[in-house]
Amino acid sequence: MICESYYEAIRSSTPSQIEAIDMGRRGIHNEGSQTLMDRLSGKIKLDFDTARRLFTLVCVLYWRG
């Protein structure tokens, strides 16, 4: 839903509205990355940047799948 809101905002909203949606999207993305790191703890070692990339990949595969 956030991605859809973001893409819709790009077409019709002000820059400040787009920025607010983007900040929310980034916050949720960071939260998901931290959850992924926590769930994989003890199995594989991830730094935060790698966890963000992996979370992005999982989201894209789920979204298109």
Image (tube, grey):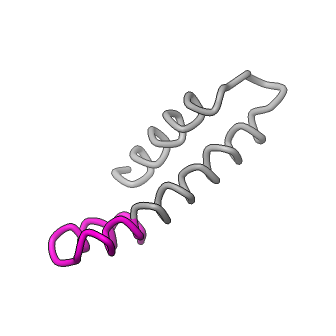
Is residue 45 positioned above or below 48 on the image? above
50 is higher (above) or lower (below) than 10: above
Task: Estimate the x, y position of residue 21 in percent, counting from the top left.
Answer: 40, 69
* Residue at the limit of the structure toward the left, as seen here: 11
The image shows residue 20 at horizontal and vertical percentages of 41, 70
Q: What residue is at 22 percent from the left and 77 percent from the top?
A: 13
Tell me the magenta residue range.
1-21
Q: Is residue 27 left or right of residue 17?
A: right
Residue 29: x percent and y percent?
A: 53, 52
- The overriding secondary structure of the stretch rendered in magenta is helix
Q: Quadrant of the N terminus?
A: bottom left
Q: Residue furthest front?
A: 16
- The mark tally for this picture is 0
Give the residue at x 71% y 37%.
Answer: 37
Image spot of residue 63 (x, y percent)? 39, 54
Viewed as shown, does residue 41 lie left or right of 64?
A: right
Residue name at image x 41 percent, y 44 percent: 61
Most distant residue in the top direction: 45
Is 41 drawn above or below residue 44 in the view shown?
Answer: below
Q: Is residue 11 left or right of residue 61?
A: left
Asked if residue 15 lies in the magenta stretch, the reply is yes
